Structure formats: C-alpha cells, structure tokens
Image: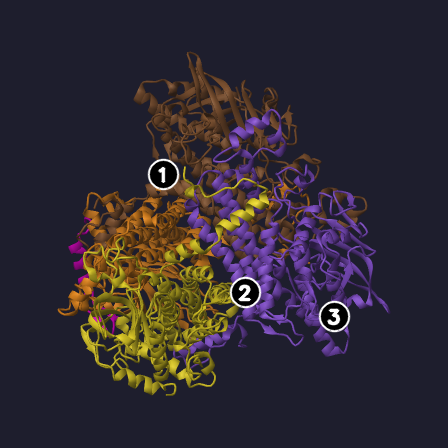
Chain colours: A yellow, B orange, C brown, D purple
C-alpha cells in the first residue's frame, strides 16, 4: 500500500468510532469540528509533504524492514544520519504548521524505544515481543497510519508510587491477563495530537520497581477501541477556535494543538498488540530510550518554532514601518537560541551509539542538556518576539475580528490600525505573534517529553564528574585521593 | 463628599451613557457585562480597601490641597515617602486583584505629570493651566472618581512624524479651537481599564516639535462624552470570560484586564478641562514626568504579580503533594526577581528631587533601569511558575469546566485529576497559574508605560559615562584627554 | 581631636609594631613596602576626602554621641538617611581608589552590629557591654582611627561545628577569662585591609549554639597587640606590585587590595575592649546585624566598581578609535547592572526599621537579595568590559613595562601598540581593564560579607511565601487549606 | 620520518636561533626558561599522546596525501568525522594540559583555510599555490613540526583601513616582490604558543579590498627566520611563573600560555613558502575558512576547560569537607555549559559541506553561534567554579608558597588552612581554581579567533531571516508582500 494522500488520511479518521469529547459534546467528525480540525490540518500537511517532490525526502525514508518507502514517523532510527534527518524533519514541519504535530512525534519515538526494549526483553526472557512489534510495524507502515504516543499517567499524589496510592488506577495497569490479550485500566493524560491519530502507542510513564509489575505495560491500539473514552483539554485561546472559522483572531489554519485525557475503562488489548506485560525491570530503559531521541529531536521543533517567531515578529516590525536592521541584535539572539537547540540535538546524534537491536541510541548527557535548553531558550525567544512586535502583539491587544469587520466600527478600527501597511495585514501579523507566544499555538515545551528537573537528574548522572575531579587532581599535583565526602563512611 | 463605597462607585459607572463595544455589541452595563465586569470588580476592591481599616492607609492619603482624606490615586506625589507609598500600594493592589487595575495607575500618573508641566507652562507663558488642573483635581478628589489615563496614539507609520503621515489623524490633535474649548480628533489605543473609569485623562503620546503644535494637547473628560467611541480589545483567553461565570476556567473573580481603543470623532473639550493646548515645547516634559513615577512604581505592580505567581505555583505543587523545600531554589529566584523591581522603584524615589511645583520627580536613570527590569524579570518568574506547576499549568492542559462538571465525564475527569488533594482544588490552582502566565491575567508589562528600548535610550542619556571615563583616566594615570571619537571632527 | 590628615594617618600606621609578613619578610613600614603601600594609599584617600570641601560631606558626619564631626566609618547608622549616605560613600570611594578599601567597611559595619547586640545583651543580662562599646567608640572617633573588621574563622572541616573539630582552634575562642580581660586563641582569615588599619574589630564568624559559648566573642584591639601574627595573602598579579613602582603593569597607584590571615596566639584583650564574652545566644544577631547594612551598602561599592569598569572599557575603545555609540547597548547593560546593586541597597535602607538601641536595621529580605546580585552582576559587567576592550585587555596581552621601555624593543612595541592614540595611553587604559577584571584590583565580591548561598538561605527565610500562597488561594477561590506537605505529619 | 618523541620535539626547539624576549631578556632556551617552559610542557603532551596507545587515535590520523600516520594538527579536515575528531582532540588536550595549546590550533586551522583558498586562487588565476602548500605540508607532516598560526595585525586606528593609516606598517604587508620570494614588513600581535612552535603559518588578518593587495599575503616560515623579532606578552600572574618552580602558587606544570608580538622587520619569505601574494579578492575566504573550523572546534577546548574547572571546584569543595550533592545544581549548570559549546561545534561539522579542494567546510551559521557561546558560557562556568570553591579560590586568597613553607609562619598557616584534608592539598586545589579562573591558565576565549561582535555580524548574514518572514506570512494568511522597509526606496 502506498503512502496515503491527505484525503485518504482524513477519510481514515472519519471512519473511526467517535469517542472524543470537548465542551460537553461528542465530536462526530474530527476533520471538521472546530475543536479538532486545526490539528488534523496540521497533521495533514505531513501527508501532503510526502507527496511533494520538494519535501518528500524530509518526511519519508525507506523501511529497513521492507525496503518500501514509508513515512519517517513510522521508521526505526538506525543511524546517526536517521536521527539528524529526524531533527531536520521536526524543524521543517514546524515551519509548515507553525506549531506542534504531536500526534506523530511521541508515537514515532515510542515505537523506537520499544524496538530496543522488546529486543532486550526477548534476549533476557525468551519472549517474542520484538517479533510482535515488527509485525505490527510492518503493517502500520503499509497502512501509513498516524500513531500518537501516550506515556504520562494521572499519577495522583506525586510523593507516592502506584501501589501506595489510595486509588490504584492513578497509573495505567493490567486488570486481567487473558490468553488472547490483556485488560487495562487507568488513564493517560495530556496526550498530544490524539484527535489526528489513527492509533495510540502506549508506554510505561515511569520506571517501576518490583511489586509494581502490573504497571509495566506497552501496547498499540486503534483510537476507537471499545472502552477508551477521550476528553480534549483546553489550551490558551481555545474558545476562539470555536468562533467563525474565517476569523483571523485564530490566525493559523495550517496547524493547531490538541491534548487529551484518555480514560481506559477496562480496555482489552489483543496479545499481538502487547509489547510489554509485567517486565518491570525494563521500564527504566523504555523511558530512557524514549527520552533520548525525543529530547534530541525536540531541538529541531523548538528551532522551527523560533524561526517562525522570528519571522512573525519581523512581519509586525515591517508592518509598522521599521527596518530589519533596527532589530539586528534581537534577531541575532533569536537565531542563537534557535540554532542552539537544533545543534545540541544533532550533537546527541553524533555522539550516539548503536543498540544491538539496530536502533541508534543518542548520547544521554547531551540529549538531556538539550531538554534543559528547550525549557529555557524558547521562552527567551518569545520575549524577544513580543519585544520586537510591540504592545498589540504582546497580549493581542486589538479589537476582535467581529468588530474589525463591523459595518460601523470596522472602518474606524481599520483607519487607526493601519501603519506602514493596511490594517488587516498588520492585525494578522500581530495575531500570529500572539498565537505563537501567548495563544493557541504555544506548545508545552517545558514539560513535554518530561520536566527539565528530570533532565537535570539525568545530566547529573551522566556527567563524568569523578573523572574530571581526577584530571584536576593530576593538574594540581595532589597525590592524596579526595573522594566525595557524601559517600565516605565516617 | 466622602470616599465612595463600592456600591456608589458601581452606580456611578452605571449612570454613564453606554459607549463601549465588544464582539459587535454595545455594552449597556459595564458592571455586569462579562466582557467588562471583572475589571470593574478589580477596581472595586480599591474602593473597598479605602473603607477597610487594615488597608485604608495604603490606598488613601490626605489631600495636600484640601487636607481631606482622598484616594491616593487622586493625590499629588510631593515627597519620597509619597512615591514609596505609591509602590507599596501597587504591590498590595496586585495581591488583592491578581492583576492590573490599569484604570487608575495611568490616570494617577498623568495627573502628576501635568501638575508639574502646567506649572512650567504657566511660568513660561503666563497661562492658567495649573489653576484649571488644581480646580479639576479638587473636584475629582471630592467626587472620588476613577480616572484612566490615555497616552498612546495610533501612530501609523512608525518612521514618520504626525504631520508626515498620509492620514493626519494618526495622532490625536486639535481640529478646532473655540472660545469655550477645543475640538479634538484622532484615537488613543490600547488604553487600560477604561471600562472601570469615570473619566479619562489625556496626555500627549510623544514629544512634539515645532510645526506639530496641534498635537500638543492634554485634557480630562467624562468617559461618556459625546463623540467618543470605545472598542474593547481582545486579550488572552478573553472568550472564556464570556462563558458561564461560575466556571473556574477563568479562575479569578476579583480582577480582570481590559484595554480599549478610544476614537475621538471631533470631541469637544470645555476650556476648564484643557491643560495643554499647542505648547509643543512642553510635551517632552509631559512624557518624562509621566514615565518617571510610572516606571518607578510599576516595580511594585510587577513585584505583586510575582508574589501571586509564586504563591500560585506553590499551590499547585502542594496540590501535587510536593513539599515547598523541593522548590526552594526556584522560590528564591522568584523572590529575587520580585524584590528587585520593587527595590529599584524605591531607589528611584530615594534619589529623586523636588520640582518647583511641589511634585517629587524620581531619578531618571534608576526609573528607566526599572523599566528594563520590568520587561525582563516577570517573564523569568512566569517560566519558573510554569516549571514548578507542571504540564497542566503550562498551557492549562485540563478538560473544560463544562466537562469537569459533566454528569458522565465529570466523575472520570475528577477521579484522574485528584492528586494529594481533590481535583477541583488542583484544577483551580493550575488554572490560576495559567491565568497569570498565559491567560486573562497577563498584563502588558513589556510595553506598558513605554517600550524597554525607549527606556534604554533614556538610560544611555542619563548615565554619566563621560565622568566615569574621566575617573578611569585618572586611575590609569593617563594625562592625555580621550574624547569620544564619534564626536570629534576630523 | 580633629579629623586626621593623610600624613597623620600614615604616621599613626608607622608607629605600630611591625607584625605583618609577606613573601617571608616582616614588613617594617606598611606605608612604603610595595606589598602594602597601595592599600594604604587607597585608605589615605578617605582621609584626604575628609579634608576636601567637595567630598567632606560624603565621608564625614556628626557623631550622635558627641556632636563632633567624625569619619562616617566611625559613625552609628541611626536612620534611613545614614544608610543611604553609607551606600553613596561606598560608591564614591570606589571611584576614587578604583578598588576596595576593605579596612574600613567591615570595621564600620562590625561596630554597628555590636551597637545593637551589646544593647540587647545588656537588656537581657544586665551586663555593661554597650557602655564599654560607647566609650571605646567615642575614643575611636576622637582619634579618627582606621578600624578593620574581622569575622571569618579558619573553620576546618565545614561539616563540623567548632567543638567537633579535631583541632579546637579552628574557630577563634576564649582560652582564659581573667579579671582584667580575656585571652583568645585561633585565627581570623582573609581579612581585608589589615595593612591599612590601626585597630581590628572582631566579631563572631558564625551563630553559635549552647556548648559553644567559648566561641562567642567580640572585641577591638590595636593591630600591633602582642601575640597577634599577621600574614598577607596573595592576590591576582600581586607579584607585579613588587616590580618597579613606576611600571604601569600595575596601573593604579591610588588604591590596592590586601587580605590577611590573623593568628591570635593567646592574645590578651583588656576588659574594656571586650564586647561579647560567651553570650552565644546573641551571636546570630551579631551576624545578622552585620550582614544587613553590609549587604545593603556593598551595592554601592559594586556600582562604583562597575562605573569604573565602564569608564575604563570606553577608554580602551576610544584609544582604539571607536566611537562610544558602537558600544551603546553594552554600556546600557553595564549601567543597568551598576544601578541595580546600588538601588537594591537603597531599598533595603528604605524598608528598614529602628532598633531600640537607635541603630537602623536594613530590611533582611532586600539586603540579602542584594548580596545575590553582588555575586552575579559585577561578573557580567566584567565580561562586558573585556568584550568592549578587546584582546589586549582580556588577559592583559601586551609586552611588559620593562620591554615597553626597552631601548631596542620599546620603539618596536610602541610603534605597533599605537592606535587612535599613542601606545602608552592605550597600554595604560588596557592595563586598567586588566587590573579591574582579572588583576590586582579584583575584590572578592562573591564571598566577601558571606556567600551567595548563605544569602539565599536568608531570602528563603525572609520571603513571606505562606502569605503569598494564601493570596493565591483566595484568588483561585479555593476554600480548602493547602499546607506545605513537607511540614504535614502523615 | 616518524612522529616525534617529546625529547625530539624539545631538541628541535632548542636548535632554533633565540629570538624571543621577555622582561628585557633574550630567552636562550625556551624549554627551560620559566617564561616559556610551561607552554612547551603543554605542547609536549601532545607529542607524548601520539606515542600513547590510549591517546594515539585522538591526536594522530592518516595523511590523506601520503597515507602515513601524522599528527592530526598537520592534517587536512576532509569530512565531518575529521572535524568531530578535531573537537574531541581539543577537549582531550585541555584535560591533559589544563589550558590552551595555542601553538597548534591556529596553525592547524590556517593550513586548512589555505588548503581551500590556494585551490580557489589556482582555479581562478592559474597559479600554483596549492601545489606549493601541498609540498610544504607533506614535508611538515614528515618532520612532525609544531606550527603556530598568526593572523591578527597591529591594526592601528580601528576605523581606518590599512592604506589609510598614518603608519603603513599597521598591517603586515609586502615590501618587495623578488624572483625568489617576497619581503614582508609589519607585525602580528597576540599570537599564541609561538614559544612552543617550530614554524609560523601566516594568514591575512582581515578581508582586503582593491587597492589593498599588498596586504593580501600568506606564508609559512621557521620561527627563527632572520628579521623576525618576538616579544612575549604578560598574562595574569605571569610573574609567579618566574618564582621558584616548585611553588604551587603556579599550580600546573603540565601546561601554560604564552602570547607573543611578532615584528617582521623586512623578513624574506622564499617563493615555495608563499601561499598568497596580492590576491586580495581571496582574503575574505581565507578569513572565513579559518573561522569556520576554528569556531566549531573551539567548543571542544572550552568544554575541556569547563570540565577541568568543574573538577577543580569540586576538589576544593571536597577538601572543605562538603559533599558533591551540595553543589548538584551548580555542577549541572557547568555540565550544560560545557556540553553546549562542544555540541554546537559538532553540529557545525554535521551541517557542513565538502569544498572542491576536498576540505570540509563547517556550517557558517552554527560555527558563529558557537563563537558567541564561547564568549559567554565559560565566564558563567568560572563564576560557578568560584562560587563552589569559596573565598580562598575566588582571588587566591592564601599566603604565598614561601610563607606556607616558612619555618616559623608555615606551621601556623598550615594549621589554619587544613580543613577536611591537609593544608597543602587544599591550597593546591584552590590555587588550581585561581589559576583556571583568574590566573595564568585563563585563555583569551572572548577574542581568540575573532570577537563575538564579529561573529554576530556573520550570524546576521547567515540566518535566513527572509525565508522565515515568508513562512510567517504564509501562516498568517497575508497575501501582500512585506519587504524590509530599510531596503525599500521611497
């Protein structure tokens, strides 16, 4: 089966049983409902790019399993070059959609994480998870489906483990193991791009210990599986998306963000779609193999976001009549921020190594350094974008589209909003900056793919401090050993 | 007449002719319409505070004109102590309302600016502006009115002055001078708190040169003056304010922000309300005397905003079950940011000096340094607040109030949103962080009261670089003078 | 007795018994020995300023005890105005000397700390320390002596208290209490400006607990007291100070830094010079009352340091032929840094309060915020200074004075070092930047007056977080209380 | 001829005619004179590494010209992998020497720059520079010589070009072209590692225009060439290096920095050593091809410097008795800084492309972003190192080695300097931090390889702003084109 066209992709979504809710309503068609259609449009552009000779090589590759052309989002990353291509794709897609297409990234990364983890489990336990995953993946590639990834559990009291919670459902878990599959219960929350996905790839959200085996699960399911109830969350300015779809108060029609809560009410998962079942000792690696390529490639997303913010801010400046050179220093700082997250991601790829399963494992120290940058630099870029764009962009301080178009008020508003260009051009540019910096286009960079504090823990673990202490000791001519006093028994 | 109660204040607003529009609608009662009532509630708290023994001294003072107790917002700042009290009041009011009560700050500051400017004009030109202003002010104090301030013009092409614009209305200007007053035309845009104001105090938005005298105007007018058309702008998540008023998706009911475009369609201003009329050579001082106390005291606002963000972030953390000490370093950084803007504002007061009119003029170097801090530090504090609060707060990633309360979905949502506390408490806390950092409570710190780049120009002018070069020259033992090569004719 | 002239001051130093060592040598005259004379020159300028009509009011005040004119460094700070004057003096003195005159600041502050502490001890215990201090102070004012302050103990293993150390001398302590005084043993280390001081005022270096009473001591002693052995430490480029005194490789002749180790080998302190003796419960206050004015006023020093760095960097730029405006953004950032530490210090004064002893106690939150700034901002200013000045200043990358003056090499060096000015002017300017940023003029901003981490602990304690959580709770409409989970017993 | 041993390397330096001066003295043996021996020791370690099986692959590679094993510093970088290896080598060498071994980096990079430039000139002009360079390089590889690079001219008045200077020698230039070579005159200043070099590779220091052809020169010369006079500059604490060589006041004996002024007093360069002669139109590329690999690989140096600073700071902390975990956050920030410069350098390699000459050209945008990081991040790391290490390290505030070892004072000093370890260990650790952050080990990161402002100019040129504006325009649905008003003729 060939790569899907946009129409085929949308049709595949329309075929699914409706089970997504927002604002008290069951959404019957995600491709047309205002709460979900913008994210579907965003994901559609990836399908369109696969058909576009100029972009095809960015978003597709050859399956290392079948040799067929496939979506890069359904590929296994087997080399440094693949991971570099991943970063470049993320940056390009942000350019096209103006925002996150999260229904693909996390799924892509989850597949890759489980590629290595199933290999490891099978090696250790004689199971056949890797073959199951391979079979599912070949099929998914052939169907060219959009796969979202789901990790984050509800978690309840953050100081307690899954078995210590008053409510045992705070982490998704096995309720029953049957011969033909498993029944799972719990929730995955804040899951990106579900509305645009055909299937959902589930991963453990934490590293589990002995006694927590029931929480060690991974599987893939069609989005419309029985028992799965989905509620879309709010995001900044999401009510505006419910307004007239011509309104440029939500300026971007090529992309949008959705994040959902998934409630698994005793959902059955057929055996051949189960990729981990109670092997708690491999959950840490599942998390690790997920975060490494994710935190590397997210540098590309964030760079793309920054590129668009830079362009958008300069649109407003030009609309105001101000020359680019007025903002040279600010543009340079934005460029530095953008290239830094992109670059650190590439370096994590360069310093990576091959896993026995064939997957490429990014460098843990550098990948986590990038997560910290991703939780800092885009915020600085946003501030610069608002600084350049002035008061109207900072909080979108302009009359509404309705008033802008009003028969009586409209002419007045347009008279006074014009600058070095007409009022609508200026308003659209400023709304884009608002959308990117404090509106519907803002993705969750800080906590997406894990918190910066979590990344710092990993940096602390990965940084070879002791060897640097030894180097310093040699240089200082100190013969006596100086172990960490925190680790010396007194 | 005594200080108004909240009821009297609201009644005074209801008495005004409706002339505010939003979403194609004329708002007939600003105290109850969802687009304006939250800002009215915010300003009401200042009236309530004046009646509250614990807060009275914060928000009131003794008129230096009449000796009567008056709102501090209608007072002349005549000493360092007054300016310090101004900063403290701003911080306190932010604590009470959670956001900006901009319908009073800019008005308060505009009155003070014109206090000195009218004095100077009268001294130079033998006019009677100062007496007019004094008469108006005594009356305003007696009526205890809420006065908004309006500076920013539409401005058109930013590289051109008012007379060079294709459209002469891009800056508010005199259309006609009559014996009994003047007729003005143009617009003031992005004006804060208009919905909550009784009157509007207008100031020149720029320093004008010869040939631009028609733009040099200052006056005060009732908000419902004939010919004045007002359109409220959008702000982040403003559509949510139109939803069910019980919904905690807009969590704060004690305050809110509005910013309006004011269209002066040939508006008549009676002579006794005109405080500047074509004296272009005093417009620079009008701007300067406005920015100095404004940029000093805004450090108090921003500190108050930071205090609330710190408290809100820790609410979420506690709801998640996490101890305060986990976030100690982040809290300390937030505290540093908060105390810095507050402190630099106080220092601008300390280093100020007395104007012949009796007003206290804050130090220009330090006041402008504070403006730059105010355009930087609260953004860092927001990032820290989002960092502490986690993914749900970062972009408000939770189901809507409607779904939260839904008969079928509600129980599921609440089951999975509970943590170390119940779901509603946690949701309210997270919504507060969203509201403060990426929602309806975000004020325009960056450009409010002028842009940071403008402040940097003033810093460059005020910093006595040449004397520091001389100090360095003496220390280095250099006898030869080293003038700025940029100023040496070759 | 009147304020001392420079000559009288130097003579008073020459009269003291030599007990200072450096490089294996006993320094017989601190006013002429190259290791100490620059710091004496720096302190001399304070004496000169007291005689200078333009500077007199900066460095002198009226004794609140005698009404006589005295050095401000020997005054009690009894009001906000006094503390503001303290900040201004610090900034001015840095301008004059280019560096720290630490032989006066710590002493001044120590006297003030003990002013309140002795008052408290006497109130609580019926002792007469306050009267002793007053008597000593009146005498010190009359003699117009230079008093250094000494707090920091050797401390040994940082994880252990004084009584837990293998060596009991790691903290200065009482060895014997006699009728006529006490005998003390131990060391004070890294003490600034000892070489320029007549007397040393000693304070406890830590807050001591029960069982540690022997370490709770405060007293003042002439520098040449029997049993006191002093060794000067190295500092950056201190060897250059031993070179030809004409050499501009050490460019500044108006000031210099020394820091010493003081070894108290069973030193006797007469009773009337003892201000605390075993009252451990007051040591915390001694530290606190020291750090508050110190950390406030140090903002003035650091601002002065920054002013000189700004001036010095621009000297090099001008010598290179570059116009001031090329560096406008960097100058503005330096100005912001300088005014920030100055301002936060002033604010700590403004928000201070009166102690029953009459002393003015600066605000603890703001004073400690300033300590953190002081450990950050001057480093940024240094980087900017090096950035502006170019490679020759960054590490002082120029041939030595000897080579510069060499008959054969000199002409070549001077030919190629000239720029828009002659080589010597350019070299002197660049050496000044080197001296200020990576040479002999660099003071210990980071740890002087305590570490930034210590200040953060105080900020955490002083910031009223709980009240801000309560504000946030009210704004969010949360009824349930949310105490810190870290303090809740489960 | 094989790779040289350390002994052979030192012997080759001793054979050169003495022409280096410092402190008025002609240095007869650079391998033993205290002003130069530490830098020779540093460079020796590279020779030692080439003989060490564990390090051999780091510092050597196979000549792409002869297939023989050669020093990587004499190789042509022909692939991304070569450039990555360059970064790794730089980091490793910093670990070994604790500082810069600048006598090799700039030379290595200059050879690579001219590899492509000579190719381009020959293609355009039919010259034979590329063959000359190849012949020289094969010979240099065979002799395994240490080649320093020299770019920076004296420059005189920075606002004037070479022909506008009052003194025509402000930029190195051709004085005479002969049949057998050229005679050059002028100076190269602040040249790193000359003392440790056998030969010097000269490059144009600026991009020259028509009329400035005499300044367009490149060549390689033995260091002891007739007419070349060398004066070593001072650097922080360089006088200490003249003290007793056992003294740990200069703690590191495995490396050191020298920077020299080279005076070319009518120096003859034989034709086969001339690689550019008046081809001014290629000077921009010479600069560019130099800066790209240099600014990429310097991320490795700076990371290595940061690693050592991290290790050194923790040495002091451990000596003080403090556990590593106390400083976890600071170590993580240092790690982030270190990995960032390293990573951005690697990314510049990844995003590079092949030059027709076979050389690998790093990405100009990313390489220049790295230069800006290199001018910022190590300064932050230094501050963190001083923060962790406390007051003694900040300015090296400890008695001198002489006093430390003094018969009478030594025991007192050592008694009071001991902490959780003995005094000497603690002093050596603290001296290392001093040396790295404010002493002899500080390299010129800010301006080495060009200034950060220069890099920002390149970033501004390389960042594809216009294409990002176009993306933003498409996303905002703006049809009208918005060109840069600064480039529109009105």
Which residue corresponds to the image point at 79% horizontal and 48% vertical from the top-left? C411
Q: Which residue is mark 3?
A: D134
| Left/right of residue B272 with respect to residue C174 in the rendered view | left
Task: Report whether residue A302 is seen.
Answer: yes
Judge the density around disc 3: few (<14), some (14-19), many (≥20) Cα neighbours within 10 Å: some
- SS at circle 2: helix
Inspect this view and state whether residue B352 appears: no
Report, in whole angstroms, how far the alpha carbon at label 3 lies from the one at label 1.
71 Å
Going 38% across and 33% down the picture, which residue do you hit? Answer: C288
Q: Is residue D249 above or below residue C391?
A: above
* Residue under pointer 2: D346
Side of B370 where C334 appears, left or right: right
Task: Estimate the x, y position of residue B429 in percent, counting from the top left.
Answer: 24, 57
Magenta stretch, residue numbers: B1-29
Q: Secondary structure at mark 3?
A: helix
- Whether residue C476 sits left or right of residue D113 in the image: it is left
Q: Is residue C80 magenta?
A: no
At a point 53% along the width and 45% down the height, the residue shown is D312
Q: Which mark is residue B109?
A: none
Chain to which the residue tagged by mark 1 belongs: C
Residue closer to the observer: D279 or D367: D367
Q: Position of residue D110 (x, y in %)?
A: 68, 64
- Residue placed most toward the observer, A435 or D318: D318
Q: Tell which subunit mark 2 falls on.
A: D
Residue C57 percent location from the top left of the image = 50, 32
In this rendering, the answer to whether B262 lies above or below C21 is below
Whether pointer 3 and pointer 1 mark residues with C-beta atoms closer than 8 Å, the reply is no
């Amino acid at each position: 089966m060939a790569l899907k066209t946009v129409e085929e992709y949308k049709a595949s979504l329309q075929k699914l049983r409706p089970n997504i809710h927002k604002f008290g309503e069951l959404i019957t068609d995600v491709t047309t409902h205002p709460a979900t259609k913008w994210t579907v449009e965003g994901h559609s552009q990836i399908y369109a790019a696969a058909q576009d000779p100029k972009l095809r090589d960015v978003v597709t590759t050859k399956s290392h399993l079948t040799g067929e052309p496939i979506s890069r989002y359904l590929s296994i990353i087997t080399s440094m070059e693949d991971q570099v291509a991943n970063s470049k794709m993320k940056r390009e897609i942000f350019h096209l959609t103006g925002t996150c297409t999260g229904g693909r990234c996390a799924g892509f990364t989850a597949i890759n994480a489980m590629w290595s983890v199933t290999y490891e489990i099978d090696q250790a336990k004689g199971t056949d998870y890797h073959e199951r995953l391979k079979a599912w993946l070949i099929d998914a590639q052939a169907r060219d489906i959009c796969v979202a990834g789901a990790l984050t559990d509800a978690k309840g009291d953050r100081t307690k483990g899954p078995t210590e919670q008053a409510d045992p459902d705070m982490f998704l878990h096995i309720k029953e193991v049957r011969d033909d599959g498993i029944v799972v219960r719990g929730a995955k929350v804040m899951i990106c791009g579900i509305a645009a996905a055909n299937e959902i790839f589930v991963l453990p959200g934490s590293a589990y210990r002995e006694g927590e085996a029931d929480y060690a699960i991974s599987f893939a399911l069609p989005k419309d599986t029985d028992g799965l109830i989905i509620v879309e969350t709010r995001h900044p300015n999401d009510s505006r998306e419910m307004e007239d779809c011509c309104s440029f108060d939500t300026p971007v029609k090529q992309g949008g963000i959705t994040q959902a809560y998934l409630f698994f009410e005793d959902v059955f998962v057929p055996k051949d779609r189960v990729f981990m079942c109670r092997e708690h000792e491999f959950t840490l690696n599942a998390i690790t193999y997920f975060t490494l390529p994710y935190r590397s490639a997210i540098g590309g997303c964030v760079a793309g976001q920054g590129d668009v913010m830079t362009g958008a801010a300069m649109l407003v400046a030009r609309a105001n009549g101000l020359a680019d050179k007025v903002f040279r220093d600010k543009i340079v700082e934005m460029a530095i921020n953008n290239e830094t997250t992109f670059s650190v991601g590439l370096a994590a790829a360069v310093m990576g190594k091959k896993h026995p399963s064939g997957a490429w494992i990014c460098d843990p120290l550098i990948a986590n350094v990038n997560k910290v940058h991703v939780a800092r630099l885009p915020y600085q870029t946003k501030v610069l974008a608002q600084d350049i764009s002035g008061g109207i962009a900072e909080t979108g301080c302009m009359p509404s589209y309705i008033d802008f178009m009003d028969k009586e008020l409209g002419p007045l508003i347009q008279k006074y909003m014009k600058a070095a260009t007409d009022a609508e051009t200026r308003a659209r540019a400023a709304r884009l900056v608002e959308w990117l910096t404090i509106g519907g286009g803002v993705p969750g960079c800080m906590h997406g793919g894990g918190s910066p504090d979590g990344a710092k823990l990993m940096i602390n673990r990965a940084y070879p401090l002791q060897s640097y202490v030894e180097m310093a000791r040699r240089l200082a001519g100190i013969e006596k050993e100086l172990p960490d006093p925190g680790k010396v028994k007194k």
